[in-house]
């Protein structure tokens, strides 16, 4: 087991906070991964489980104490929550933060947005802790605020936990020596280029911090199908903590759809998305739609009126919602994080996870050049899921 260290974690979303709890559980329950050979730990590879191979529908234990591998609590440490401004994300973060406190961790709620002075006040408040931390855990290496925090940091260990499928792009960009940039972002025009140039020293420092070097260990904790860089350690997130605390879920007879924020991020056309959801509802007999926390109220209202779906606004990350139940025997999602995480969280429950491809015709004219290949990669690399072909939506209007 790794020796205790002064650990400080930074999270900006509910999923990141959940994955920090998963990392803490795995870090306490598993031995040291051993020496790294060509960037790969010497432990044997663990493959994702198959969610539908158990055929066990569970007993309807919604709150659940679970039957996971290890019910013990991890060593406590400090988690700093840097909340976004949207209410749904903040609400979910508060719920998961309460669970983290129940696990014995210290959770600090630090506002870093919402005003011109907020980032500077947050930096001043966190500076001392950042400098003292021997191990820093980050949930979003693309975050400019997190990158700023890494400037004064001198950790012996740096851990990156999943921020969903963005982890795949993070490792690709880091390996190619590119600046860290979210896959769905466009250049932002001339003003955007000026800002990027001014920020380049901070971004460059973050890349160096996140690259293994003598005296600094870098670990990636992920459910995604990623390969570590030379010298980097990879630990598989198999959602052992979630399975040990919740479920197994009671299964319903219907199909549940999982929403995406691809419309809100400007990647997918809103009308095409509505058509696709309607088609999936009819073909699969779906009754519920689990909304992404960033989906707009107007879009969800239109979906409900057009399809008759019950719109569910989860108050926790979907992995916890699904594990607690009740949940459909089939879960259908567009390319997203959950097609990689739910097979872990729902292993042995009899749930089938299916992913519907994104038809290139659904993409907007302003979608980034990376959108098509990235979304296809999310689907192509998903294991233990049923793949549904995209059927071209009729032209909008």
Image: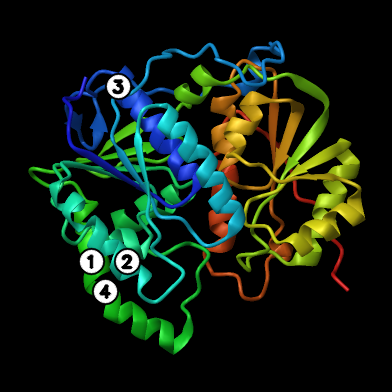
Would you say the residues marked 2 and 1 are in contact, meaning their CB atoms lie under 8 Å apart?
yes
Q: Is residue 316 left or right of residue 151?
A: right
225 or 114: nearer the eye? Answer: 114
Regarding residue 177, the answer to whether it shows in the image is: no
* Percent x, y of residue 211: 21, 51
Pointer 2 or 4: first along the chain = 2
Q: Reading the chain from its start, which is encountered first: label 2 or label 1?
A: 2
Q: Circle 1 sits in a helix, a strand or a loop, which is it? A: helix
- Could you tell me how far apart the alpha carbons at marks 4 and 1 are, in whole angstroms? 6 Å
- Identify the disc placed on residue 381: none
Asked if the residues shown at circle 2 and circle 3 are in contact, with their CB atoms under 8 angstroms apart, the answer is no
Q: CA distance from mark 3 to mark 1?
A: 32 Å
In the image, 119: left or right of 206?
right
Labels 3 and 1: the sequence-earlier one: 3
Depth-wise, is mark 2 or mark 3 nearer the camera? Answer: 3
Can you give x and y, in whole percent of width and height, for residue 108 in the image? 36, 46
Return the residue nearer the eye: 277 or 392: 277
Q: Is residue 43 above or below residue 222?
A: above
Sequence-wise first label, 3 or 4: 3
Label 2 and label 3: CA atoms lie apart by: 33 Å
Where does the N terminus fall, quadrant-wise? Answer: top left
Which residue is labeled 2 in the image? 179
Residue placed farthest to the bottom in the image?
190
159 up-or-down from 101: above or below:
below
Above or below, 308 relative to 74:
below
Residue at 20% across, 63% down: 205
Which numbered dot is residue 204? 1
Q: Quadrant of the C terminus?
A: bottom right
Q: Which residue is mark 3?
A: 28
Residue at x-position 49% and y-position 17%: 244
């Amino acid at each position: 087991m790794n020796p205790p260290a002064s650990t400080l974690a930074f999270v900006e979303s509910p999923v990141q906070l959940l994955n920090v709890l998963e990392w803490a559980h795995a870090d306490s329950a598993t031995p040291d991964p051993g020496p790294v050979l060509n960037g790969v730990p010497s432990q044997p590879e663990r493959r994702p489980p198959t969610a539908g191979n158990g055929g066990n529908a569970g007993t309807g234990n919604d709150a659940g104490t679970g039957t996971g591998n290890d019910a013990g609590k991890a060593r406590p440490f400090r988690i700093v929550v840097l909340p976004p401004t949207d209410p749904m994300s903040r609400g979910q973060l508060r719920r998961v933060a309460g669970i983290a406190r129940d696990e014995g961790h210290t959770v600090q709620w630090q506002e870093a947005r919402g005003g011109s002075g907020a980032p500077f006040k947050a930096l001043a408040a966190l500076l001392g802790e950042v400098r003292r931390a021997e191990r820093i855990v980050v949930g979003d290496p693309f975050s400019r605020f997190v990158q700023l925090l890494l400037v004064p940091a001198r950790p012996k260990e740096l851990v990156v936990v999943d921020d969903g499928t963005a982890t795949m792009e993070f490792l690709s960009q880091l390996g190619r020596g590119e600046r860290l940039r979210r896959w769905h972002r466009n250049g932002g025009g001339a003003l955007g280029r000026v800002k990027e140039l001014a920020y380049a020293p901070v971004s460059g420092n973050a890349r160096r911090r996140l690259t293994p070097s003598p005296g600094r260990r870098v670990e990636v904790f992920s459910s995604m199908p990623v390969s570590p860089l030379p010298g980097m350690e990879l630990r598989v997130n198999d959602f052992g903590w979630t399975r040990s605390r919740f479920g197994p879920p009671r299964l319903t007879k219907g199909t549940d759809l999982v929403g995406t924020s691809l419309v809100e991020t400007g990647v997918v056309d809103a009308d095409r998305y509505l058509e696709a959801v309607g088609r999936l509802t009819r073909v699969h007999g779906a009754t519920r739609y689990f909304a992404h926390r960033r989906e707009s109220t107007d879009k969800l209202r239109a979906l409900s009126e057009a399809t008759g779906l019950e719109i569910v606004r989860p108050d926790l990350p979907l992995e916890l919602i699904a594990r607690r139940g009740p949940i459909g025997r089939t879960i259908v999602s567009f390319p997203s994080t959950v097609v990689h995480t739910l097979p872990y969280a729902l292993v042995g429950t009899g749930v089938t996870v299916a992913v519907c491809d994104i038809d290139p015709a659904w993409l907007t004219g302003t979608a980034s050049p990376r959108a098509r290949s990235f979304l296809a990669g999310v689907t192509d690399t998903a294991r233990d899921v049923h793949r549904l072909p995209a059927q071209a939506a009729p032209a909008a209007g």
